Image (cartoon, rainbow, N blue to C red):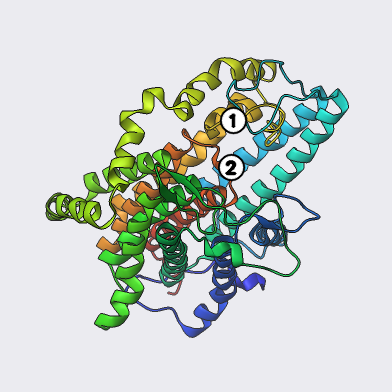
Amino acid sequence: MSGTAVASAPAVPAERAPTPARRGAALPAVSLLVLYLALLLLIPSELVLAEVGSAGTPANLLGLAFLLWWVCARLGGQVSAGLTPMHLALGVLVLCVLLALVNGLAHGWTRPVDIRQDFDEVWTLLPVTETELFDKSVLGAMRGLIALGSWVGVALLIIDGIRSWPDLDRVIDVLVGLCAVVAALGIYQYFTGDNLARHVQVPGLSPTYDVGVSISRSVLNRVSATTTHPIEFCVVLTTVLPLALHRAFHPRRTGTVRRVLTVYLPAALIALAIPMAVSRSGIVALGTAMLVLFVGWPANRRLWLLVLAPPAAVLMRSALPGLLGTIRSLFTQSLTDPSVTARTDDYGTTLALYSEHAILGRGAFTFIPQYYRVLDNQLLLNLIELGILGLTATLGVFATGYYLARHAKRHADSEEHRHLGLALSAAIAAMFIAYFTFDAWGFAKTGAVTFVLLGLAGALYRLEHTARAPEPASTDR
């Protein structure tokens, strides 16, 4: 991709199409982002480059190339646009991740004997030597750097590569469309029990474990499609749903058939597939997203939602018997659910590990489930692995993304762009809530979508901010 793809240039007003030269200059960055999203969402997360390990997905490797290009382009002056608040927030997070790794390498790693859950049936607490624990922790940290570096690279390319409103619309359209494909695979899996993702084979990639395994809850098929787990499936689709609804409310396609197929159908597929994962985490995230949207919508749209929600629930209960009842039981029986009590039991045991490296942390991805325990709380994991500084930086990137989206919601120059700011803020809020309920960075697609959303917020802020900038005064006399 040439450096001119993202070079600083005056913003194009929303109502005026970019010139052919401008469109050509922006094409490489947007096309690469389209390729990245296709690799991320369509290839099962279990298929990786064996030499790299679990972090060696094609999307992660491409994201690393984005990061390398961005660093070289910045140092070489090819990217001259100013820094946004999201640049700074991501920079602080990267710094905290590097400091945590250095601290872990300097002080080593320990494993308390009481770290395992009593009911854990996946791994047993086998003896481990200090050397083995050190080697595995370093390996986990290196894989973590690959994943995080890739995600940050994608966010930076989105911020500096999207230079016009049509570019932003295209990336959002592709993201929504690909998630609709994932949703369609999930719907098929729900009714048949067959995950078509297991048939996907890519030359050069090897599965880290079985691809496309179906699991059930209360005799219902929990869907995962190309994701690793139903929780990841539900959270990814839930956080993209606000963007799908945004496109449904502000369609750009002409013609009834094209509009139905490319605008309304994706939103319907995503909304239908979300409950099929039967995920408590996803439903909580969905409630968060819809609450943010509901509060920000005008009165007439709120009224339509209140009118249509009850018949939609009745229709779903008739068409999908047992699904809503199973989802309801996830919350009514939560006090006795082992998956909930395990989350509350995590705090006392794991906080002892946090106290060993309270400020800087022990290193991202060094709290390895095989040697410790499964933590269904990414923010708690970040507290342990990145220390209080890293947790603050994590909260900072979410707060920055949410603020930038809300800023656009308040100050954008059109109703469509203001609603896009609302939709992005709902998506980021939903993802943040999900971080309380499962280890999001342990899932390739959830971690990547998080930084895609943050990058979109940064790009939206830049476009909105540039559009409002006054024209420079003429020096002609």
Q: Position of residue 424 (x, y in %)?
A: 38, 52
Q: Quadrant of residue 58?
A: bottom right
For the N terminus, which image quadrant? bottom right
- The residue beneath circle 1 is 381
The vertical placement of 296 against 61, above or below, is above
Depth order, front residue of 228/92: 228
Q: Position of residue 423 (x, y in %)?
A: 34, 53
Amino acid type, label 2? Trp
The reply to whether discs 1 and 2 touch (Cβ–Cβ < 8 Å) is: yes
- The residue beneath circle 2 is 441
The vertical placement of 138 against 274, above or below, is above
Secondary structure of the residue carrying numbered label 1: helix
Few, some or many residues within 10 Å of mark 2 (<14, 14–19, 20+): many
Q: Position of residue 38 (x, y in %)?
A: 56, 67
Q: Which mark is residue 346?
A: none
The vertical placement of 69 against 114, above or below, is below
